Each structure stands twice: as C-alpha cells, then as structure tokens.
Amino acid sequence: MTPRRFNPSDNRPRQPFGRSGRTPTPRRARRFRTPRRRLHDVALGAGMVVALLGLAAAEDRGWLGWVDRADAWVDGMRAPWSSGPAATPVAARHVPLCPPEYRRGGGGVTCITDGDSGVADGEPWRLTTRSGGVDAPEVGRPECAAERTAGDRATRRLQALMSGGYTMSGGSADKHGRRLVTVTLADGGDAGEVLIGEGLAQPWPTSGNPWC
C-alpha cells in the first residue's frame, strides 16, 4: 500500500478516531446476580420466615414467659429501691382491672394489670417492695396452666388490697417506661410483701418458676 503524501492545499478535516470521526463511548458493564447470589437471598428469606413462625408458635404456647422474667431481673438491677418522694394517699375505692387498651397506660385511668403491675392516672407502674423486687405469676404469657391460675389470684388480691386505700411512691422508670413503685396500704403494710407472704408472688431476683 502506497503511503498517502501530505498535500498543503488539502484542507479537508481529518478524522482522528476511526471512520465516523466520533469519540468512542465505553460501554457500561452489565450487572447481574450469579446463581449462588440468588440462592443465598432465597435461603436468607426462608430463614427469616421460619424464625418468625417459630416466635409466633412460642408466643401462642406461652414458651416466652422467661423473657418477661429476664426483663424484670434487668429492671430489678437498675432499680434504686428508694421510697422517693411520698405521694398523696388514695382513699379507699374500687380499683378496676385494666381493659386491654389501657394495660400499657394512657387515658388517665387507674387500674390493675396483673399481680405486680398496673396504671395510675394513665402512667404505667411496676410493683416493688421496700427491700427489693416483686415477681408475680404471669397472666399474659404463663409457662403453664397452674401459673395462669396463680396469676389470676395474685391480680385479684392486689386489686383487693389497693381498693382499701394506698399510698404509691417510687423512683426511676424501667426500660419499658413503667415507674418502679412501692405501694403502702392504709394499714401501713407493704402490698408487695403481703403478696410474697401469701405465696402469690416471690422476691426478685428469683431462683426459678415455683408455679410450674
């Protein structure tokens, strides 16, 4: 092939890049999932579904009662157990059980949730004693039928005790936002200690579940 000679009179524009004269644009690499990546995503999704179904089954069968006890132990370790400023005594009157929509507080209601918790003027609280914590049988998530029966008895007993008049005092709140309180009855007794003395509750920390 004969090389092209330079001609000064030739004013035609040169084509620096290929025949079209346009600067070539680099192609973007295609992104795609490999079969291994897809299999990993499917396995992860299936594992999450199985875990959620397992938690739901455990909730229905009452196998998660130990979670509430562990939370109570943490709350007990964080509680100052000081009486705090004394509250105004509440005169004797019927204290109702909390309806489902007010078990976590709100509405300005005063009611009993179970054997160691309730709501006062819309503020949720958890029962303690002058010397430590209180653990009553579970009502919402019992570990056995006997615990549910004992929990109902403890709830009714606390309701009867507080309906005779009481003074509630306490310090800080637990991690669930419930105020840690001591309930002093009209006769000067401690509601938590009464429940423990009657076998309807146990001191916290505990050594196990005596109702199952």
Image: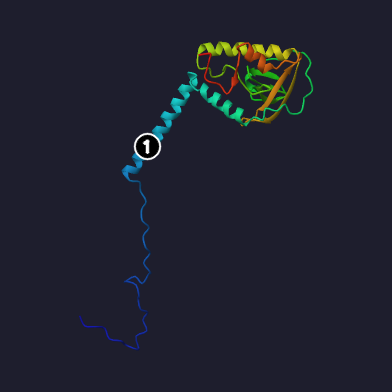
- Front in this rendered view, residue 53 or 174: 174
- Front in this rendered view, residue 35 or 11: 35
Apparent side of residue 17 relative to residue 175 in the rendered image (left or right): left
Q: Where is residue 111? Give x, y as percent.
A: 69, 18
Quarter holding the N terminus is bottom left
Residue furthest bottom as drawn: 8
- Front in this rendered view, residue 58 or 67: 67
Q: Where is residue 112? Give x, y as percent.
A: 67, 18
Q: Residue 20, located in which quarter of the rendered image?
A: bottom left
Q: Where is residue 47? Give x, y as percent.
A: 40, 32
User: Which residue is drawn at the image coordinates 46% and 26% (left, top)?
Assistant: 55
Apparent side of residue 73 relative to residue 181 in the rendered image (left or right): left
Apparent side of residue 37 relative to residue 2 in the rendered image (left or right): right
Instruction: Identify the amino acid type marked 1.
Output: Val
Q: Is residue 22 above or below residue 137?
A: below
Observer able to see residue 147:
yes
Q: Residue 106, located in which quarter of the rendered image?
A: top right
